[in-house]
Amino acid sequence: MIEFMNVSKSFWTGTQRKVILDRASFKVELGNSLGILARNGSGKTTIINMMAGLEKPDEGRITRAARISFPLGFMGGVINKHSGTENCRYIARLYSLDPDYVESFCRWLTGIDEYFDRPVGTYSSGMRSRFNFSLMLALEFDIYLIDEGMPASTDVEFNRKAGSILRERLTNATVIIVSHQPKTLEKFCRSAAVLRNGQLYQFETLQEAKQLYDYETQA
């Protein structure tokens, strides 16, 4: 479970204050995967980072009562000067997992061959995305956080394998995904919400959320 209680978050852009959340309260229960529709620039990445604990609210409280993943695409904790092998084994120990298993799993899923033993800082953006997503899938969580704005892999074989594993994990886990495209949410979520004017409006179905989102987009 993730619960936001009277949470406020804003940024100074240099010319004005951009409000992401304004005393917002909502809850995401385990077993109820949630898709969040939000326009570009409305704070999609910020709200995901707050769920992960990477950013703190200006006011209010966020309660996390589950094992929550780092956001897909987040490279924090991965040390660029270390190889994929070294990073896998280091992070496995942080989560009290078998380093041999995490290394083998990520080596197989990424499919980057000899680059796995080279510094992560030498990886292309696509290779880094594959490595990071592999790490997220190697560490089992109750809630997986996905930001559509994060870099995605264009490797067909990787997407096939990773998508299959993620679908299997979601039979026992929950996903929270933010996107500006309703079609993206259809793949993962039964319920949906709209981030609008500093509030998160939750609905039972994606269709209901889409009606508000379309109205706001056209207004």
Image (cartoon, grey):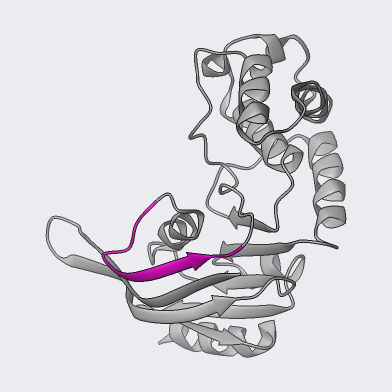
The residue positioned 61% from the left and 54% from the top of the image is 68
Provide residue 89's location: percent of width, then percent of height. 67, 21
User: Residue 142, position in %: x, y?
Assistant: 70, 58
Q: Is residue 197 visible?
A: no
Task: Give the percent coordinates (x, y) of residue 120.
Answer: 57, 18
Of 110 and 94, which appears nearest the observer? 94
Is residue 72 at least partly visible in the picture? yes
* Quadrant position of residue 198: bottom left
Front-most of residues 6 and 63? 63
Q: Position of residue 173 (x, y in %)?
A: 76, 61
Quadrant where the image shows the C terminus: bottom left
Q: Quick check: 199 above or below 115? A: below
Please say whether residue 33 is one of the residues in the magenta stretch.
Answer: no
Q: Residue placed at 63% from the left, 71% from the top?
A: 35
Q: Quadrant of residue 171?
A: bottom right
| 121 sits left or right of 198 in the view | right
From which residue to which does the magenta span run? 55-65
Residue 23 vertical position relative to residue 185 in the rendered view, above or below: below
